[in-house]
Amino acid sequence: MDIEGARFLVVGGSGVLGGLTTRALVDAGARVVVTVRDQDRLTEAAAAAGTDPITLDVIDVEGCAAAVKSAADQLGGLDGLLVATGVPAFGAALDTEAAVAEELFAVNTLGPMALVRAAGPLLAESGGVVAVLSAILADLPTNQMADYSASKAALSAWLGVVRRENRRAFRVLDVRPPHLDTGLSDHPLAGTAPKLPEPLPGADVVTALLQALRDDKSEIVWDPKAKELILR
């Protein structure tokens, strides 16, 4: 994919990873519209992207579809959708409250699915790409993170099917990095994070992401033995 001139919607553009990705795409010559959940960050997001940001909470499925349409209208089409939203929760599986599990799946699974469904026809027109920043938990479900792991695994499985069903229409890039230095684990829906590995810099993921976009890759995964991100 040629990133220069490509039209991207970055969902979660006010977050650490979404912000880094937005700036990297803009620096590479892409035209970017971002969504933000926090109204207080609208000005910052607008400055980073140079376009009008869209307010969105991904648990609003209808709002997800409207955000995709708004971005496409602003950009004159869509070549890429990048989803950089997510929320963790910690604690024993049997102790997780139903409301926490529901919100985990709403944010981590159902919201991204709604965004991809809305963007699919537009990306098919342009032969574009959807990239979703998920987590290593999709591959390595972890104690004290059962529902969090399940929400990511469900999304990854769904993306795999979307990739196969639409392989001639648009590309699907599933990004599953390890624990990052973005501070996400400091703001869980419930519980306290257990001891986690040394975090990988979020900037490393963004570098790999742009390379994967350029090289038309389908996955970015973490190799725990080599301690490096693998593009495939």
Image (cartoon, rainbow, N blue to C red):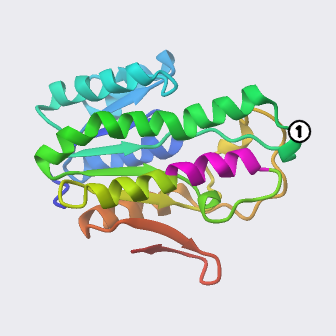
Crowding around mark 1 (Cα neighbors within 10 Å: few <14, some 14 to 19, many 20+) is few
- The answer to whether 76 appears left or right of 203 in the picture is left
Which amino acid type corresponds to the residue marked 1 in the rendered image?
A: Asp
> What is the quadrant of the C terminus in the image?
bottom left
Question: Closest to the observer: 53 or 115?
Answer: 115
Residue 22, given in percent of the width and then of the height, sits at 35, 43
Highlighted range, magenta: 145-155
Residue where numbered disc 1 is placed: 95
Residue at point 58%, 55% (across, down): 135
Which is the main secondary structure of the residues drawn in magenta? helix
Q: Is residue 15 visible?
A: no
Residue 4, given in percent of the width and then of the height, sits at 15, 53
Magenta stretch: includes residue 24: no
Label 1: element kind = helix
Residue 207, given in percent of the width and then of the height, sits at 40, 63
Residue at point 52%, 25% (across, down): 59
Question: Closest to the observer: 47 or 210?
Answer: 210
- The answer to whether 58 appears left or right of 108 in the picture is left
> What is the quadrant of the N terminus in the image?
bottom left
Instruction: Specify the farthest residue to the bottom.
Output: 226
Magenta stretch: includes residue 150: yes
Residue at point 56%, 33% (across, down): 107
